[in-house]
Image: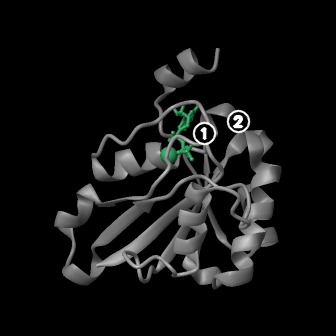
Amino acid sequence: MKNFLLLGFPNSGKSSIFNILSGKSRKVSNYSGISVDYAIAELSDNKNYSEEQKIKIIDLPGVYNLIPTTLDEAVTIGTLLKLNENIKDFSKVVIIVDSSKLEAGISLILAVKEIINNEDILVIVNKSDLLSYKDINLKKLEEYLGLKVLLCSTINEEEAKKKNK
Ligand SMILES: Nc1nc2c(ncn2[C@@H]2O[C@H](COP(=O)(O)OP(=O)(O)OP(=O)(O)O)[C@@H](O)[C@H]2O)c(=O)[nH]1
Ligand SMILES: [Mg+2]
């Protein structure tokens, strides 16, 4: 079983993605600093995969950079630095960035790149419902970062209309 970390700014949608992937109902809210400790769950989809293909996802408290100023930020950064006794290793760091705060999110991505191999990082630009497609050139972003970038939204079109009006 492989561990995947979910890392990103507060309010970027990490717990929303964690809930969708695992079927759990971790608290999600439109305030920063909702998750103050990590949570671990298996992908709901794991039943379709062999033991070595199965994935555990780890939702972490939000961080703006890799310099901890609070205990919950220290949990995230400690886990990233493999200092967490309960999560000794991981095979991917999934960095979640809010599409409306892309520029700010890039500084966090660059900081993670300093300590993690490029092939072990996946960037997810979340809240794609806040973008119009011409707003983002994914290919250019991938080239600039040297990382794989995916675009996603955790809400459907109807919810997005309500939320974003
Ligand atoms: N418009 C939009 N809002 C989203 C999307 N995904 C999550 N949200 C909203 O963003 C807010 C924050 O979501 P969370 O999942 O709690 O964010 P988090 O990254 O876990 O936040 P912390 O635990 O504080 O670090 C909530 O109001 C979510 O409903 C999305 O794809 N589109
Ligand atoms: Mg959270």
The residue that label 1 is drawn on is 127
Q: Residue at x 74, y 39 (%)?
A: 100
Q: Nearer the viewer, residue 120 or 88?
A: 88
Q: Residue at x 78, y 60 (%)?
A: 106
Disc 2: CA contacts within 10 A as few (<14), some (14-19) or many (>=20): few
Q: Amino acid at mark 2?
A: Leu
Q: Left or right: 67 with respect to 46?
A: right
Q: Position of residue 58 (x, y in %)?
A: 41, 63
Q: Amino acid at mark 1?
A: Lys
The residue that label 2 is drawn on is 131
Q: Secondary structure at mark 1?
A: loop
Task: Say above or below: 47 vs 131.
Answer: below
Mark 1 vs ligand 1: CB under 8 Å? yes
Q: Secondary structure at mark 2?
A: loop
Callouts 2 and 1 close, C-beta under 8 Å = yes
Which of the image's four quarters has the C terminus? top right
